Image: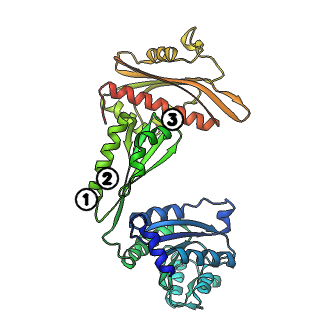
């Protein structure tokens, strides 16, 4: 009865994919002492081969709690993948807990012992006796040898549902995934002809709620491909995810949706996938061999830093003026108050000689109220025959205010470059 209910759960969204729970094991995760990058890696890799990751759970090094988590995961998912708890110390309990959940004893595997000894031998050491515990796995398990570390993994089927146990060291986990676990899951669940592909459109100059207003109907009615939004300071990511039998079919599913979104959002879309706003700006400057001079106040040079990090060779001069100082000292009287007119005038004065470049000014003077910073700010970009300016008001912690200001400054510059005839 439980199996039938689980099958229905997978079919309500017209999916026939195996569902999975990722369980990360280690009290240090719950204490925030280390960052959990393993579950993020596994979630991405599992999704890419067609596994529907439904849950991500972290549990400490307590046997009873670990057993409870694993039993619940087996009840609600077709597949469980764990990381951590496979070391040689007394608090590495994954082997014993999985054996208990499966109702079996641990058994010694000589081949695993020899593999562990070989790892130590390569580094010029004799294996400590404590590491012998790592050669034990639950009886009936399929062992996964680990040539890049001392913690072998294993796969134990419990009532037809596999628990795959992997080491917590990221390098070892990734090796075992790529060389053993990924192919095993494909074969076990018949996923060889299944692909999950994504295309990410990156948007600036518009908020998440406005994006939702413009393409909300596409999001709500999307099935295959699915559309999702992810917001960060000043930028929105629109992820289009398709399930297909191959990359060609995935592209044919994604392309019409991408075209429709682009037609609605226009030049608010600045890039795709791994594109960055500063990378797009650098490309546009390079296309027409344009130099750039920047003035920043409250963003503390973040615009210039982002461009230099590419690295970018278009910046002719970068000026950073502390927000507590006026800007009249450098640019004359009447420029203390940030406004579109004032900021445009600054950008005009920043244009490199010879009209073969662009000037960018990002101006604002934050005021602090308790722990929150508020800023009235303007950004302006001026090139030959082109002027773009934008004003905004926002509040938040100082880092967020500066990050969003740098995004708006870069995006204002991007739009000016597009009007100058550059394209990407």
Is the residue marked by circle 2 packed among few (<14), some (14-19), or many (20+) residues within 10 Å? many
Going from N to C along the chain, the mark reached first, 3 or 2, is 2
- Residue 368 in percent (x, y) is at 70, 29
Residue 150 seen by the camera: no
- Residue 413 in percent (x, y) is at 42, 28
- Front position among marks 3 and 2: 2
At 58% across and 91% down in the image, what residue appears? Answer: 104
Residue 175 vs residue 392, the one in the foreground: 392
Which image quadrant: the C terminus? top left
Instruction: Give the answer, above or below, for where 415 lies relative to 82.
Output: above
Instruction: Give the answer, above or below, for where 278 lies relative to 48.
Output: above
- Front position among marks 3 and 1: 1
At 37% across and 74% down in the image, what residue appears? Answer: 186
Label disc, if present, on residue 248 of the rendered structure: 1
At 64% across and 29% down in the image, what residue appears? Answer: 374
At 67% across and 75% down in the image, what residue appears? Answer: 65
Q: CA distance from mark 3 to mark 2?
A: 35 Å
Q: CA distance from mark 3 to mark 1?
A: 39 Å
- Residue 181 in percent (x, y) is at 44, 74
Residue at which label 3 appears: 305
Q: Residue furthest top?
A: 333
Dot 2: what SS? helix
Going from N to C along the chain, the mark reached first, 3 or 1, is 1
Dot 3: what SS? helix
Label disc, if present, on residue 254 of the rendered structure: 2
Going from N to C along the chain, the mark reached first, 2 or 1, is 1
Rendered image coloring scheme: rainbow
Instruction: Give the answer, above or below, for where 45 lies relative to 388.
Output: below
Q: CA distance from mark 2 to mark 1?
A: 10 Å
Dot 1: what SS? helix
| Contact check, label 2 and label 1, Cβ < 8 Å | no
């Amino acid at each position: 009865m439980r199996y039938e209910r689980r099958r229905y759960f997978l079919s309500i969204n017209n999916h026939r994919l195996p569902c999975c729970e990722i369980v990360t094991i280690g009290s240090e995760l719950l204490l925030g002492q280390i960052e959990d990058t393993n579950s993020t890696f596994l979630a991405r890799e599992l999704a890419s081969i067609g596994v529907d990751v439904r849950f991500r759970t972290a549990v400490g090094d307590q046997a009873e709690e670990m057993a409870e988590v694993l039993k619940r995961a087996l009840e609600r998912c077709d597949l469980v993948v764990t990381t951590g708890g496979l070391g040689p110390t007394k608090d590495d309990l994954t082997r014993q807990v999985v054996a208990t959940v499966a109702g079996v004893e641990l058994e010694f595997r000589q081949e695993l012992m020899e593999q562990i000894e070989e790892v130590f031998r390569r580094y010029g050491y004799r294996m400590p006796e404590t590491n012998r515990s790592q050669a034990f796995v639950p009886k009936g398990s399929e062992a996964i040898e680990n040539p890049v570390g001392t913690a072998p993994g294993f796969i134990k089927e419990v009532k037809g549902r596999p628990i795959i146990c992997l080491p917590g060291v990221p390098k070892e986990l990734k090796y075992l995934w790529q060389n053993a676990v990924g192919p095993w899951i494909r074969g076990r669940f018949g996923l060889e002809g299944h692909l999950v592909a994504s295309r990410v459109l990156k948007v600036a100059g518009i908020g998440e709620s406005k994006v939702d207003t413009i393409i909300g109907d596409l999001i709500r009615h999307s099935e295959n491909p699915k559309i999702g939004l992810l917001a960060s300071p000043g930028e929105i990511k629109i992820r289009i995810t398709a399930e297909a039998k191959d990359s060609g079919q995935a592209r044919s599913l994604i392309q019409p949706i991408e075209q429709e979104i682009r037609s609605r959002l226009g030049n608010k879309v600045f890039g795709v996938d791994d594109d960055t706003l500063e990378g797009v700006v650098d490309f546009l400057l390079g296309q027409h061999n344009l130099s750039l001079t920047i003035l920043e106040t409250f963003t503390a040079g973040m615009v210039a830093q982002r461009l230099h990090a590419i690295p970018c060779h278009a910046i002719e001069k970068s000026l950073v003026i502390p927000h507590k100082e006026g800007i009249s000292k450098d640019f004359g009287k009447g420029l203390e108050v940030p406004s579109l007119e004032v900021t445009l005038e600054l950008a005009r004065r920043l244009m490199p000689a010879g009209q073969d470049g662009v000037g960018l000014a990002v101006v604002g003077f934050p005021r602090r109220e308790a722990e929150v910073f508020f800023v009235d700010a303007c950004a302006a970009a001026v090139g030959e025959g082109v002027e773009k300016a934008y004003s905004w008001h926002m509040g938040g912690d100082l880092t967020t205010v500066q990050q969003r200001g740098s995004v708006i400054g870069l995006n204002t510059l991007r739009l000016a470059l597009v009007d100058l005839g550059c394209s990407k």
